[in-house]
Each structure stands twice: as C-alpha cells, then as structure tokens.
Amino acid sequence: MFEYISQILKSFTQGQRILALLILVVSIVTITLGPSLINSNTSTCDELTIRLKSQEQQIVELNQRVNELNTQVLTGQKECTDNLISKQKEIMDIVNGMIKDAERSNKQTIIKNNETHETTMKRVDEGNGSNGEVVEMQVEKPKVIIVKDNTDMVKKLKTMKSKIQNNFKENK
C-alpha cells in the first residue's frame, strides 16, 4: 500500500504537494492538541453551579428592587390621586357655594334710596307783596331700582359643576 503513495505523490505538482503537506500537518496538530484545548476551555459542573447560584442571587435581588420600585410608584400614584380628589372636592364646594349665592340673590330687586336732599334757600323780595321771608325748598333725588338676574351665571355654574363631576368619576 505504501508503494503506491510515492507514485501518487509524483503525479501532483510541487504547489499541490506543499498544500497537501500543510493540510496533513494541521490535521495532526488538531488531533493531538484538540482534546487538551477543549478541556482547558470547558468549565466543570462545579464552576457552572457556582455561576448559576450567583446569577440566581442577582435575579432575586433585582426582583426585590423591582418590587420596591413598584411599591413606590403605587404609593406615589395613590398620593397624587388623593391630592387630585381633595382639590376637586374643594372646587366642587366653591362652585356649590357660588350656585347657592347666585340662586339666593337671583331676581332680587334692589332699591337704592339716595339720602341726599338738595336744599335751596331763596329770599323773596318785599316788593312783590311779600314780607321778605326766606323760603327753603328741598328736592329729593330719584330712587334707583336695580334688578339682579343671575340666571345665566347659575346655568354656567351648573354646567361647570357637571363637568367637574364627570371628570371626578373618570379619575376614580
């Protein structure tokens, strides 16, 4: 069998012989050094177990941190919602007070009586058949009548109240 190898090699060109020799050398090196390279780069089960436990501990710590952050977010949302609800209640109280005031004073007639009197003094001459007396005359200024009609304001306040109530229901 080895007799024919020399004849086979003679049929190749010199470049092909060098290439075949390089392939042969690389194969021999890979076969002899391969198992030792694989063993040195492969971790044992003990190393993998240690790595796995370390990563599990990191996962547990990260889950705890996520839970803490979720709790903080929920607490912040609750505080924000409570503040919003209290502000809406304050606004509703103010609007209700405004509606009551407007309805109470709706269609009221206010008569404003001016207390000022205008006094004029006049002297009557004696030559006209009078005895020269001083005559005093008072003139009252007219009363002012004001009629309040808050119907439009009451309607607008009630509209605002219903919008606030709808917004309040949506936020619950």
Image (spheres, rainbow, N blue to C red):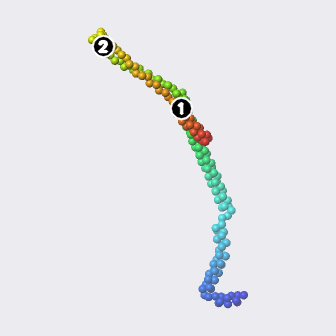
- Which residue sits at x=35%, y=18%? 119
Q: How far apart are marks 2 and 1 (CA)?
A: 56 Å
Q: What residue type is labelled 2?
A: Val
- Which residue sits at x=62%, y=48%? 67
The one nearer the camera, 46 or 14, is 14
Of badges 2 and 1, nearer the viewer stands 2
Q: Which amino acid does label 1 sit on?
A: Thr
User: Whole-percent x and y of residue 1?
Assistant: 72, 87
Residue at which label 1 appears: 151
Query: Which quadrant would residue 37 be assigned to in this image?
Result: bottom right
Whether residue 163 appears in this view of the structure is: yes
Measured along the vertical axis of the image, is residue 45 above or below residue 61?
Answer: below
Would residue 131 be found to the left or right of residue 155 on screen? left
Measured along the vertical axis of the image, is residue 140 above or below residue 48?
Answer: above
Q: Residue furthest left?
A: 127
- Tell me the quarter of the image containing the C terminus: top right
The one nearer the camera, 30 or 157, is 157
Measured along the vertical axis of the image, is residue 114 above or below residue 15?
Answer: above
Q: Which residue lies furthest to the right in this view?
A: 1
User: Whole-percent x and y of residue 117?
Assistant: 38, 19
- Which residue sits at x=51%, y=26%? 108
Residue at which label 2 appears: 124
Name the secondary structure under disc 2: loop
Q: Which residue lies furthest to the front in this view?
A: 128
- Which residue sits at x=46%, y=25%? 145
The one nearer the camera, 10 or 154, is 154
Name the secondary structure under disc 1: helix
